[in-house]
Amino acid sequence: MCGIVGYYGPENPVDVIIKGLKTLEYRGYDSAGVAILNNGVFKRVRAEGKLSHLEKKLSTETFNGHLGVGHTRWATHGPPVEKNAHPHVVGGASIVHNGIIENYAELKDQLIKAGSIFHSDTDSELIAHLVSHEIEIGKDLFHAVIEILPKLEGAYSVLAVHEKYPEEIVAFKSGPPLVVGKNEKEVVVASDLQAIMPYTKNVVFLQDNEILHVTGTKIEFFDDRGQKINKKETKVDWNPELIEKQGYDHYMLKEIYEQPRAVAMAMGPHVDLASKEVRLCKVGFGVGQLEDLEQLEARADWENTLKTFEGVERVFMVACGTSFYAGMVGEYLIERLSKIPVECDIASEFRYRHPVIPKNSLVVVVSQSGETADTLAALRLAREAGAKVLSICNVKNSSMDREADGHLYMNAGVEIGVASTKALSSTIALMNCLAVALGKAKKQLNEGDEHKFVEALLAAPSHMESVLAYDKFFAEAADTLKDFRGFLYMGRGIHYPIALEGALKMKELAYMHAEGYAAGEMKHGPLALIDQSMAIIMLAPSDELYDKTVSNLEEAKARGGKIISIGSGKNEKLEVLSDHYLALPEVEWTINPLLELIPLQLMSYHVADRLGKDIDQPRNLAKSVTVE
Ligand code: F6R
């Protein structure tokens, strides 16, 4: 899940590549490097750590060239030190690689036996050796790549350049994304759209086993046997303002504050304000090509979606991390509203557990990035099994979006903070819409209930605005909270996934021990953890499980834990039982997750900030996990 950028054109390649890498730094920030063709030879500069370290080194360098490649790394093979930073250079060849070469040990062994000398611990360096060798024995750059492709196993997207071919970049992929854009004078190829957007809005996404050959400003596409193929350009909507911090100290805080809007944007296309009905818009089951979605007639598509849903007997929710918790919220909503059985799976487990996927299943994959390797593999497995796959992605045209049968969009806007926030809220809004749609299709939801749930959803953004006021509370409470030994987050039913999410946020941002538990499980072990040094965060909004949750709270209180409880409206019982009681607006049970997750995000944010942690780029993490 590294970020890669290549450039050909009249600008200083260093400037374009660094600007591009900055937008991709969320993919990894262990080290960074560039190789720029400078008076006919590649000049390489690399630095350990964040991109700013590389920028400092580059500030004393001058370059005279028109072509280069760059990389920001999330370490897989070999520690994050300079010798392992990309680009890897062998002979005249320079390469940058995102992914993992699974058979690298065997290939490296063969190369060493044949006399190659390796300078890094990475799997990636061998690609530079292979390319360089093919060129030494007479191949040109393009044919060198064709020659080495069958040898590589694993997940990769690679840019290869060579001093003998000063006008050329050859790019190829199997797994992680690659996209290219060109205008009259320049070409940019990168892992993600945002690196290309300043230069053109017309882009081409490479599919697996396709090769891009850049020669000057000419771009051509080939299959892995070297046969030319035609590819369609996609026009992308993009608003650069959306990726500025806009006065917030961190992207994460900005994104927390953007959640009411994100929820409105997610549900917007799917709810009819006048009739208070859900009509999923342009899901596109049966349409095939993603580009054709734009031309879909919304009403006809909705009727097709309803028909598809009528045949669904089982739903699988498959995702990773925060997106998985969004799937769990979906499980509670869909089972209650549609009576369809739902199974939730962590994608990395699903793909290897030999899941039984009946043909009439709907497999919902949730992914902010649309590129998470395990979720993408799960999607492919589900399609092979003959199930219908519905993707819920934030990044349009991402791999999952392109490969799914049906599409829902988070519409959360660009999420830069590595810890996911607004993508979760958007997805919970979509899960509400999906549950109502399935409930209607299965004739389990009457009109009155539909109106009730839709009204509740429509009101959610303004309730969320009011909950953001807890920002101030946690900005102060963080001083005390940071000294706790650990945090236990608890909830029952639909609150349980939010408890898990609260704990994940605390772990990833503040690097503190935190666990999420189903509150009823406490007495089966976790109660032993509770003493004065343990903070208990109890999610207890009013619903049918409220009384049981309060009993669990009493058990925790009796063991001396410090308690923050989160409930609905004025609640004397919770006030008495808790050290701090946070009141949320009283809403329909379907909406509670959207409200209760905000205080948990703010809590982790402020504790991490007080501890001086790197909030937008927590250590060891990356935003887009395109390796297993
Ligand atoms: C946590 C977080 C991760 C992601 C996970 C899945 O804050 O951001 O747990 O949710 O890596 O990523 P996507 O949604 O892109 O598949």
Image (cartoon, rainbow, N blue to C red):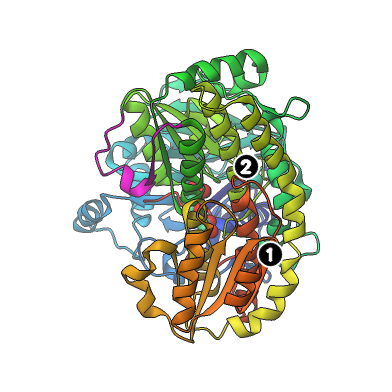
- Seen in the picture, residue 142 relative to 473 is either above or below; the reply is above
Residue 380 placed where, x, y %?
Answer: 37, 33
Residue 168 placed where, x, y %?
Answer: 54, 39
Residue 592 placed where, x, y %?
Answer: 61, 52
- Residue 344 colored magenta? yes
Viewer-proximal residue, 138 or 44?
44
Residue 584 placed where, x, y %?
Answer: 68, 60
- Residue 32 colored magenta? no
Element on which disc 2 rests: helix
Q: Which circle's residue, 1 or 2, is located before the other in the chain?
A: 2
Viewer-proximal residue, 328 or 188?
328
* Amino acid type at mark 1: Ala
Magenta span: 339-357
Element on which disc 1 rests: strand
As drawn, the label of residue 450 is none
Whether residue 552 is visible, yes or no, is: yes
Image-based side of 322 in relation to 152, left or right: right
- Seen in the picture, residue 99 relative to 510 is either above or below; the reply is above
Q: What residue does disc 1 label?
A: 583
- Seen in the picture, residue 472 relative to 289 is either above or below; the reply is below
Badge 1: few (under 14), some or many (20 or more) residues near its Cα, within 10 Å? Answer: many
* Amino acid type at mark 2: Ala
- Residue at image point 70% right, 64% down: 570
Nearest to viewer (mark 1 / mark 2): 1
| Residue 116 in which image quadrant | bottom left
Badge 2: few (under 14), some or many (20 or more) residues near its Cα, within 10 Å? Answer: many
As drawn, the label of residue 429 is 2
| Residue 379 in which image quadrant | top left
